[in-house]
């Protein structure tokens, strides 16, 4: 108590708790007023969804007509912002793309944030606003979330965990088991940009500033294929491990051989140059806005026409065909063939 | 990409393959010295384009492969110490010593950092005056000048907390060791283009003359390598044995003089042990007296060499070109890139790893 109301000394102030911290403190994860203020000021404001406004333990949502697709992913990237994109855009598009690869229209997204004590609130706001922008353009609603704070040194700024739900409104079985000999393999653009852009800033390699991540939402491209009535057999977005790893995975699961042509795989000058310097193979470098589509051979022209001019995937081309057998075989630029395998771990820059 | 695309051109490659088929009248065994060349040969399927009579064997020029286990163990011992920041090129982190690798040291709490240049570790030393920063100076004549510059610069800037763990080797003595071996079957060499960019190729002239072997300084792109093989076979068929330069866009006879001067200032020739091969006199580099203070062995204790543990792995014979990876009884069974028994299975430049990844059609006698 501050004493008798009639005798208040106006020069005396009670030690009210600070609520406008410029940085995340452990209190922001404590479940009290600070956390609620963070949720209101940052998350609810940016995501602006009625499901969040209900401030309930979970979201009560209308269910779609078709089958459901569900996926989950976690995002840890350093630095949080890199040329062409940021962790917020990655978290939304990565999850949306996983749904799209099931042929599912993205509907709902959850977002859990693990924040490191000391993270600037401005930085968090920028990340969340980027998520909101990307979610809005992908047509996915952010309907529920969670916030935890870990002590300084026990995180890397922000980790984001998501789950996504999508609607499958067609009868196709889009997965590796549906791939058939004779299928055409379509690649949706040049490879290796995301991995090299992040490595460029992370290691201060001073690459040209034109090297930007390819991070993008792939649903419009998939939607276009489905709307055109293409009997899509399989879709796979090329993330960690790059094009090579994705093809090896599909070949293994689908029990088919994939024969590709090195000359038909687009790689920009910047990515090639950076890979040359470091002794890396762009076939194994990460992407965040590219996918491969397996379609019946007689529908390849129709599929390419459907994809033409859509979003990030303007550069689609046939890179190979599916045969009976196993493994991935690539015809090199000099005309010899070699098998493509998965790497043991991550690619490491060579000594010389 | 200029200076790259021309040397990956399918028509030029097939042109050299056709020329080779025309001039080859009997079997020849040629060794490419450098691991980068081995990688390119296997990755691009170059052996598929060669006449059956031409057999390529893979040389000892993979820095990861020839670094002795004892030096790796020393590296891990230093990297495990509190107060040390241990810096290395990326592909050394997966190379096993006798019991573990640097990735494991890092997982156990050691401060092990991947750098792209020794100069990066110098920067780390300047930023962390309270810590000892050690750079793992591994490689051939290609990495030596930059490593030399690092200690020269460290001395200039008075960075007493910086040192390098030296495992530098040089190519010509290894070539001589291979040629003087009673089991040698190498008849011609593709010399390593990047080593010669630094050192020039004068030092190969006495070797070509003494052992009567053609030596062709060769680049790394498929057309470079096919042209290098063509020049080498042409000499073999004519009974010649001189040094020629296929990689003239990068290599001059005298090499890069400022790089050689830096190298000579910081390093002197010493006896070195090569993993899988053994000790070769005057085959490596150690720091000169002037830079002895920057020697990690002086700060953290000398490397103690033992004899190599005998295992089923035939890495030593592979590195000398006596055997090919597929001759090894444990290739692809007990030994693969996830569980390497020998260093050539570790680095992408190692012959075994290249064979495992790309499984080439093997030609010629094994």
Image (tube, rainbow, N blue to C red):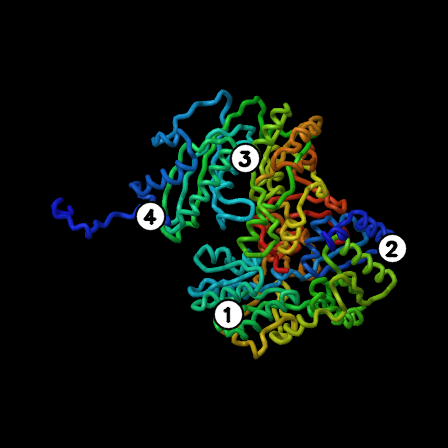
Q: Position of residue B215 (x, y in %)?
A: 78, 64
Give the mark, 2 or 1, whose residue is nearer the N terminus.
2
Q: Mark on residue B23? A: 2
The structure residue drawn at horizontal position 42% and vertical position 33%, both measured from the top left corner, is A48
Q: Which residue position holds label 4?
A: A26
Q: Which residue position holds label 3?
A: A97
Nearest to viewer (mark 2 / mark 1): 1
Callout 3 touching callout 4 (CB < 8 Å): no
Q: Is residue B225 above or below residue A300?
A: below
Q: Secondary structure at mark 4?
A: helix
Q: Position of residue A162 (x, y in %)?
A: 45, 37
Q: Chain of mark 2?
A: B
Which residue of the protein is positioned furthest toward the top in this rendering? A65
Q: Secondary structure at mark 1?
A: strand
In 3D space, how far apart are the residues under numbered discs 1 and 3 (Cα atoms)?
Answer: 47 Å
Q: 10 Å neighbourhood of mark 2: few (<14), some, or many (≥20)?
A: few
| Near-viewer residue (B58 or B118) | B118
The answer as to whether the residues below labels 1 and 4 share one chain is: no
Give the mark, 3 or 4, whose residue is nearer the N terminus.
4
Q: Chain of mark 3?
A: A
In 3D space, how far apart are the residues under numbered discs 4 and 2 (Cα atoms)?
Answer: 76 Å
Q: Which residue position holds label 1?
A: B162
Q: Quadrant of residue B176?
A: bottom right
Q: Quadrant of residue A341?
A: top right
Q: Chain of mark 1?
A: B
Q: Secondary structure at mark 2?
A: helix
Q: Position of residue A108 (x, y in %)?
A: 46, 30
| Near-viewer residue (A102 or B39) | A102
| Near-viewer residue (B280 or B154) | B154
């Amino acid at each position: 108590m501050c004493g008798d109301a009639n005798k208040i000394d106006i020069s005396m102030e009670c030690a009210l708790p600070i609520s406008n911290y410029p940085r995340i403190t452990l209190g922001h994860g404590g479940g009290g007023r600070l956390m609620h203020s963070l949720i209101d000021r940052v998350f609810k404001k940016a995501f602006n969804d009625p499901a969040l406004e209900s401030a309930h333990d979970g979201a009560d949502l209308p269910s779609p007509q078709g089958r459901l697709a569900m996926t989950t992913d976690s995002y840890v990237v350093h630095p949080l912002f890199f040329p062409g994109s940021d962790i917020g855009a990655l978290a939304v598009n990565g999850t949306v793309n996983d749904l799209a690869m099931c042929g599912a229209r993205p509907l709902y997204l959850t977002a859990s944030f693990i924040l490191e004590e000391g993270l600037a609130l401005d930085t968090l706001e920028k990340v969340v606003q980027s998520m909101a922008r990307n979610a809005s353009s992908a047509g996915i609603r952010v309907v529920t979330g969670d916030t935890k704070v870990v002590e300084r040194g026990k995180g890397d700024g922000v980790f984001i965990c998501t789950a996504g739900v999508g609607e499958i409104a067609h009868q196709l079985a889009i997965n590796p088991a549906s791939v058939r000999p004779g299928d055409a393999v379509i690649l949706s653009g040049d490879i290796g940009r995301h991995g090299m852009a992040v490595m460029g800033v992370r290691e201060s390699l001073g690459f040209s500033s034109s090297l930007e991540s390819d991070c993008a939402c792939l649903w419009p491209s998939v939607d276009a294929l489905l709307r055109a009535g293409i009997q899509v057999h399989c879709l796979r977005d090329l993330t960690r491990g790059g094009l090579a790893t994705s093809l090896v995975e599909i070949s293994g699961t689908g029990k088919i051989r994939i024969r590709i042509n090195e000359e038909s795989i687009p790689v920009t000058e910047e990515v090639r140059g950076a890979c040359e310097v470091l002794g890396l193979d762009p076939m194994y470098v990460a992407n965040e806005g590219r996918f491969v589509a397996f379609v019946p051979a007689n529908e390849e022209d129709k599929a390419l026409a459907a994809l033409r001019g859509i979003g990030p995937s303007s550069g689609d081309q046939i890179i190979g065909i599916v045969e009976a057998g196993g493994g991935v075989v690539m015809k090199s630029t000099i005309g010899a063939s070699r098998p493509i395998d998965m790497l043991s771990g991550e690619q490491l820059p060579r000594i010389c | 990409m200029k200076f790259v695309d021309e040397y990956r051109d399918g028509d030029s490659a097939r042109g050299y393959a056709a020329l080779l088929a025309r001039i080859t009248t009997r079997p020849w065994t040629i060794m490419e010295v450098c691991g980068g060349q081995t990688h390119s040969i296997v990755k691009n399927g170059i052996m598929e384009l060669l006449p059956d009579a031409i057999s390529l064997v893979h040389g000892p020029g993979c820095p990861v492969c020839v670094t002795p286990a004892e030096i790796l163990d020393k590296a891990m011992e230093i990297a495990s110490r509190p107060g040390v920041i241990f810096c290395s090129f990326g592909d050394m982190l997966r190379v096993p010593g006798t019991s573990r690798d640097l990735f494991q040291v890092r997982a156990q709490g050691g401060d092990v950092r991947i750098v792209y240049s020794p100069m990066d570790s110098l920067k780390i030393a300047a930023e962390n005056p309270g810590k000892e920063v050690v750079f793992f100076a591994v490689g051939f004549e290609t990495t030596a000048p930059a490593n030399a510059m690092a200690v020269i610069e460290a001395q200039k800037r008075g960075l007493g907390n910086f040192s390098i763990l030296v495992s530098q080797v040089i190519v010509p003595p290894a070539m001589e060791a291979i040629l003087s071996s009673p089991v040698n079957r190498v008849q011609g060499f593709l010399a390593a283009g990047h080593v010669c960019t630094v050192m020039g190729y004068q030092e190969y002239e006495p070797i070509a003359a003494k052992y009567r072997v053609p030596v062709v300084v060769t680049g790394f792109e498929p057309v470079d390598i096919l042209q290098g093989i063509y020049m080498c076979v042409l000499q073999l068929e004519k009974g010649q044995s001189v040094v020629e330069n296929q990689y003239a866009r990068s290599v001059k006879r005298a090499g890069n003089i400022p790089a050689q001067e830096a190298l000579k200032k910081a390093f002197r020739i010493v006896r070195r042990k090569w993993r899988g091969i053994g000790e070769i006199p005057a085959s490596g580099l150690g720091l000169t007296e002037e830079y002895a203070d920057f020697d990690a062995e002086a700060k953290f204790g000398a490397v103690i060499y033992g004899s190599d543990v005998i295992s089923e792995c035939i890495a030593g014979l592979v590195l000398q070109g006596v055997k090919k990876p597929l001759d090894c009884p444990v290739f692809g069974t007990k030994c693969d890139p996830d569980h390497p028994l020998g260093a050539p299975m570790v680095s992408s430049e190692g012959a075994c790893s290249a064979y495992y990844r790309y499984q080439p059609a093997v030609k010629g006698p094994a």
